[in-house]
Amino acid sequence: MFSRYINACGKIDFYVIEMLDYLIEIKNLKEKKDAIILAHNYQIPEVQDIADFVGDSLGLSRIAAKTKAKIIVFCGVHFMAETASILSPEKKILLPDLDAGCSLADSINVKQLVDWKKKNPDAVVVSYVNTTADIKAESDYCCTSSNALQIVQSIDDKKDILFLPDMFLGAYVQKKTNKKIKIWPGECHVHAAMKFEEIKNLKDEYPDSEVLIHPECACGSQAMLMAERNNDKSIHFLSTEAMIGKSQESKSKNVIVATEEGIIHKMKKACPEKNFIPINRTSKCNFMKMITVEKIYNSLKTESPEIKVPIELASKAKIAIDRMIKIG
């Protein structure tokens, strides 16, 4: 009966046994405490596999708002747990590692935004969901990578727009909408490292492949230009959830993926027959990888660390989020 715990060297794999113990304890704690586990698409495979739901940040926050569970273990980064707290103030939101931050969210603080608004008093502020609660509270609209075009298109053409904090997503939206947009020079350190040459080289190696690019990527502008010049229909700019959908629809055996590599686990589970090729082998977010099965267990056991956005701040931040949800 213990054969499943024997590794290739004929020794007992105690790591597997330890993981099974954690899984049993986590299952018991979830039932006892009326809890669910939400995991972002970029989490490590072990975390994705034990989660009740896996998705993008806003999708998971919407699930958090709808669930009847009293406790939500949010396996992602800090701003995601904050958004869940804003949308679900009556629930206990746990983030298994408080150090799980975000370089993009950290690229602007509230003082910088307030100063920027003072210099552009009539502008409309559109903040990416990858921002802290206090930034959302100073914004007119939030957006995600899947609805940024919709949000910006809905704004009066006569209005200037302050778009933050991701400059690559901002450039993509500006090109697609031709709106008057001023862009904050922030970036995600993972997506900023993804270069056009890597896509070009992989496309040469896999000519029949489809290319899925997240709009946060630094390679976006050149890839868009190449697609337009060559009328290349195999290059797509998509949110993480749309990437997963497209990977399932694609008739190509080879799919090049330009975003954080954690998403490939979910893609492979849905389409094991396909070859998913990350744009590079170092496209990992160390913040996302901080969450582990052991930390989830400890978080559920102690019901900490808890993320609770103060009521007044949450009420202000929710205005921008609600406006986004109303548009689409």
Image (spheres, grey):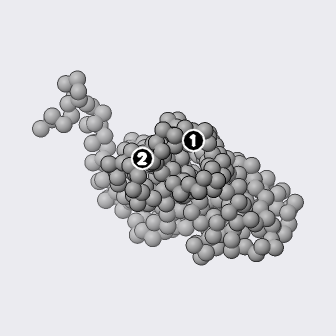
Q: Residue at x 51, y 54 (%)?
A: 234
Q: Nearer the viewer, residue 44 or 78?
A: 44
- Residue 320 visible to an observer of this rendering: no
Most distant residue in the top direction: 9
**Counting residues from the N terminus, which is met first, the one under dot 1 or under dot 2?**
1
Residue at point 76%, 55% (across, down): 183
Which quarter of the rendering shows the C terminus?
bottom right
Asked if one can make out residue 35 in the rendered structure from this viewpoint, the answer is yes
In which quarter of the view is residue 68 placed? bottom left
Q: Which residue is identified by label 2?
A: 254
Q: Which residue is mark 1?
A: 200
Q: Is residue 287 left or right of residue 186?
A: left
SS under mark 1? helix
Residue 194 at x, y = what percent?
60, 41
Is 270 left or right of 116, judged from the image as shown? left
Q: Amino acid at mark 1?
A: Lys
Tell me, for residue 248, which label it has, or none. none
Q: Please, which residue is most extreme toward the left here?
A: 1
Residue 200 vs 237, above or below: the answer is above
Residue, x 80% and y 71% (percent of image)?
159
Q: Nearer the viewer, residue 293 or 255?
A: 255
| Farthest-out residue, right | 119
The amino acid marked with disc number 2 is Asn
Q: Which of the pair 163/168 is nearer the observer?
A: 168
How many labels sit on residues?
2
| Residue 237 occupies quadrant | bottom right
Q: Quadrant of the N terminus?
A: top left
Query: CA–CA distance between discs 1 and 2?
Result: 14 Å
